[in-house]
Amino acid sequence: MTKKNVYTIKELYSSENEASQIERYKKAIEKFKELYGDCEYRIFSASGRTEVGGNHTDHNFGKVLAAGVSLDVIAIVKKTDDSIIEVKSEGFPKDVVDLSDLSVHENEKEDSSALIRGVAAGFKNKNYGIGGFKAYTTSNVLKGSGLSSSAAFEVLIGTILNYLYNDLKASNVEIAQIAQYAENVYFGKPSGLMDQMASSVGSFITIDFKDPKNPVIEKIDFDFSKCGHSLCIVDTKGSHEDLTDEYASIPEEMKAVAGYFGKDVLREITLSDVLENITDLRKKFGDRAVLRSLHFLNENETVEREAKALQSGDFKAFLKEVTKSGNSSYKYLQNIYANKTPQEQGLALGLNLAEMVLDGEGACRVHGGGFAGTIQAFVPNNKLEKFIETLNSCFGEGSCHIISIRPVGGIEVADDI
């Protein structure tokens, strides 16, 4: 195995977090040994992700700007000779999946065992090897945060199978596609491919899903730390539970508009198509579906401008586009709060407070799927202390997280702890 396929803790995390990460890994190894004895083990990690541009565009084959982040799921793993995958995740019951049965289990829907079974099935469907292992996992990816804890877990399982049974023959892109398949078919949650792709590939990337079976991925070398700003994720403490119908309505409405033109997804139509037929579209599908379609078509262009700004080093222009993307999500995509619970508007409140502190500088926007969860902000370092203080005073101590961009996605971690 070449060095590039195994990464050290120092390579994965910022220097100020290295000591705490070492302690985290040590505790995970100790817990693994309590469960499975003092045996040989390997260590794996898959990152959470942050979406910077392209909010709700991937499921209609659009463009996104995303990155793997320093928050991740780690696993201590022992390969076995049987067909049983056993995973004990910190704070959750043990999952036991028999690989001799890879059918969809209705009673597993929305359970982590469904993700394990689905990923294994996806590997088998692509003629890759599968086999048993025992694992202990722990995560610091905030659940329901928009950092995609489920995608990180799916990618982690795929990464383990790829290293243990396939000599890394499955590409990062294939692992992401398998992870999406597991979430859609086995877990029962509709999702695009962006979450899994950013988690699996890592780094700071643009993804063009025009051909979803062969997405075009481009890495962008850009260091936020040199721009005088910090990347913050604020947990507004809203829950993503019972919001599946809200998430599902977005691709459904977009695809309904595309269907008017005889197409499957909005990527196959143009802004002119919508504008020239807007009266009939409003009558057939309602104003929200039209607004969401306009969001999609304009958001693709916003992603292009964001990427070009970063590539050229024009951070001010980049922030302007981030703000534009956030405004579009708020006003046109309308995923800031759930219509069935209008009294719960943590995201709107967080964005209001963020804008007050930023006062025309930096940028802020909804983060991830929306309706609840987190906001993202690019905060000038001279306002960082005030920003954290203000947001924490509303949502609780520790609600504001400063994160870093991770250079890689799902990988093996060197046992040099």
Image (cartoon, rainbow, N blue to C red):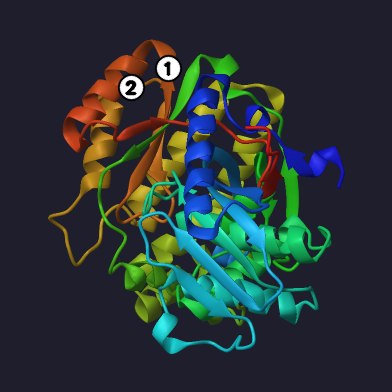
- Identify the residue under disc 2: 358
Q: Secondary structure at mark 2?
A: helix
- Residue 395 location, x and y as percent? 21, 37
Which residue corresponds to the image point at 79% horizontal and 73% vertical from the top-left? 128
Q: Amino acid at mark 2?
A: Leu
Q: Amino acid at mark 1?
A: Pro
Which residue corresponds to the image point at 35% horizontal and 56% vertical from the top-left? 91
- Residue 386 location, x and y as percent? 28, 17
Which residue corresponds to the image point at 32% horizontal and 60% vertical from the top-left? 240
- Identify the residue under disc 1: 380
Crowding at dot 2, Cα within 10 Å, few <14 / some 14-19 / many 20+, comes out as some
- Residue 148 location, x and y as percent? 47, 53
The vertical placement of 54 against 124, above or below, is above
Crowding at dot 1, Cα within 10 Å, few <14 / some 14-19 / many 20+, comes out as some
Residue 172 seen in render: yes
> Residue 370 is drawn in which quadrant?
bottom left
**Which of the image's four quarters has the C terminus?**
top right
- Residue 253 location, x and y as percent? 43, 73
Residue 403 or residue 158, whichever sits in front? 158
Q: Residue furthest right?
A: 2
Q: Residue furthest left?
A: 343
